[in-house]
Amino acid sequence: MLLVRLKSLQIMTLAIVGVPFLALDSVQAEAILPSAWLLAQTAEVERITGFYMNIAIFLPALALFVIWVPTVWWIDDDSFGLGLEKRAAWITASVLTGIIGLLVMLLVPYFSAGLAAMSFAYLVPTLAYVVSRNGQVADVDKVLTLYHFGNIANEFFGKLGAKKKVFNRNKASANAGIPVEFVGIDLNTRKMDMFRVARAKEFELFEEVQGLVYDAVSRRSTDIYLEPSQDQLQVRYRIDGVLVQAEPFDTETGPEIVDIIKTLSGMSVEEKRKPQEGTFSAKVENRTVEARVASAGTKVGEKVAIRLFDKRIMVTKLELLGLTSKEEEKVRASVEKDMGLVLAVGPAGCGKSNTIYSIVRSLDPMIRDIKTLEEVVEQQIDNVVAEEFNPKAGETIVDKFKSILRTDPQVVMLSDFRDDDLAKVALQAASTNRLVLSSCVGTDAVKGIMSLIERGLSRDAIAESLVLIVSQRLVRTLCEGCKEPYQPKPEFLKKYNLPEDTEAFYRPPTEPLPQVCPECSGVGFVGRTGIFEVLEVTDAIREIIANNPTEAALRAAAAQQRMMGLSRNGLRLVLEGRTSIDELMRALK
């Protein structure tokens, strides 16, 4: 690690050896550095009397030296703060080239050539470092850009008493050329409406929203939340199921940001209090990201929630959800049946809707008539008819479902199972040669069955129709680039009946790394996977549902078919080093 921290030595050496030579007279210079002085003595060069260099020459040389020293200091601190891999090389290059440039400036007979050499030796490594570090940081953190100079000017005017920003009121001025192209989509007709985008572009801060969406998508965010407060518009992303703070907007720009998003989504900008919904699409780096937007008024302004659907990070195949081979086999066998009800249960945000979509994709739409019914279609599947119902137009999901059943589909996917009237019709349909797929809120598979019974639905209809119930959670997966092993406590292994010879559990780094992990950006996790419990409704379970439905009896029947519970499945991932025990406990709370 050559010359990693040489600030004091560097300054002292160069200050003592370098610049003072510029002020020495001929006798002093010859006595101290005869060889260098001889190199500079040529007959062709006209010498002046007195000092070897006059004050007009000495001052620019001193100024260049004074600029170079803090620049090296800054490269040292900046590369350390960013955790750059080649930090030592950058510091070494900037110090050595500066020393060489200083020596050349002292030795060459023509001062202008020496000054040019020193300037070249200063600028080349400095600009090379700036280009390298700017390529590894966010746009707003780049240096020597118009945005950077604008921030410096704002600080200067702020010290003079300015209360508002003079420059960079639009942060996205640093993000010119962001590869984001918005496309307006009508919520009801799903038709393109480019007038929305044209109107949105009329706003001064349009590029701000481009930068916001680009940043969220780049960080694999599934949701963006804009929440007003007294002094700012707070911005939060949901990344791998966890909320992460992002750079907020000030009170001056916040309302306009909300108006731009509402305009893109086809909402009324004038309506500030009532809840509204809309959609838009964004082409980000040659891929399409769909967005569902909801807004509502608060006492201090409007809050906005944006749900992003990025196919790049969406799991669309059944085999990639995280099911074990036996669990996947049970699911595939159940959905190959001609009739029955398949339910996915879990809390909000656990991925149950995506599981149902993955099941639909596993079916062949060329040999089975498949239809889906949702209030808003979230995912389009080739050769599958997707239908929507519009409550604002007086449509109900029950009436729409009955209308679909009259077309005699073989498979129907329902967005949810919350409505009791819908559940009754669905149970009846599932017992008459149709496969019905849906999801509902629940804690586990057994309680999912009990919740259907407690809602007053016919126990006979549930026993006859229900063929499979899947409960799930999502856990973040550890980053392979920076996860660290540790020895679990013996009492923990004993409590959960885990092998005593378990060598290690894994977790995110507990101490700061020398450099930020490029794979996870220092979070310690990348992506998520599911943990499941899959309960196949056997004849024994049907008998319990129809005659004496108790949770204890259902759990005993589930144990007989060796159903692996959520916690057990999660511990399997911990043993495999794919997630941490703390993350598992968080997901199971």
Image (tube, helix red, strand yellow):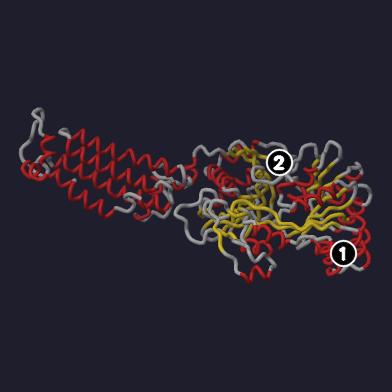
Which circle marks residue 216 in the picture?
none
Label 1: which secondary element: helix
Q: Please, is residue 585 above or below residue 325 in the view? A: below
- Residue 233 visible to the viewer: no
In this rendered view, identify the residue nearer to me: 189 or 358.
358
Q: Dot 2: within a 10 Å radius of its alpha carbon, few (fewer than 14), some, or many (20 or more) residues?
A: some
Q: Earlier in the sequence, mark 1 or mark 2?
A: 2
- Residue at the spot 38% in from the left edge and 42% down from the top edge: 129
In this rendered view, identify the residue nearer to me: 502 or 437: 502
Q: Is residue 68 left or right of residue 208?
A: left
Q: Secondary structure at mark 2?
A: loop
Q: In this rendering, would 434 be left or right of 300?
A: right
Give the percent coordinates (x, y) of residue 424.
90, 56
Report whether 530 appears left or right of 406: left
Mark 1 or 2: the one toward you: 1
Q: Is residue 67 visible?
A: yes
The residue where tag 1 is placed is 453
Q: Amino acid at mark 1?
A: Ile
Q: Amino acid at mark 2?
A: Asp
Q: Which residue is mark 2?
A: 186
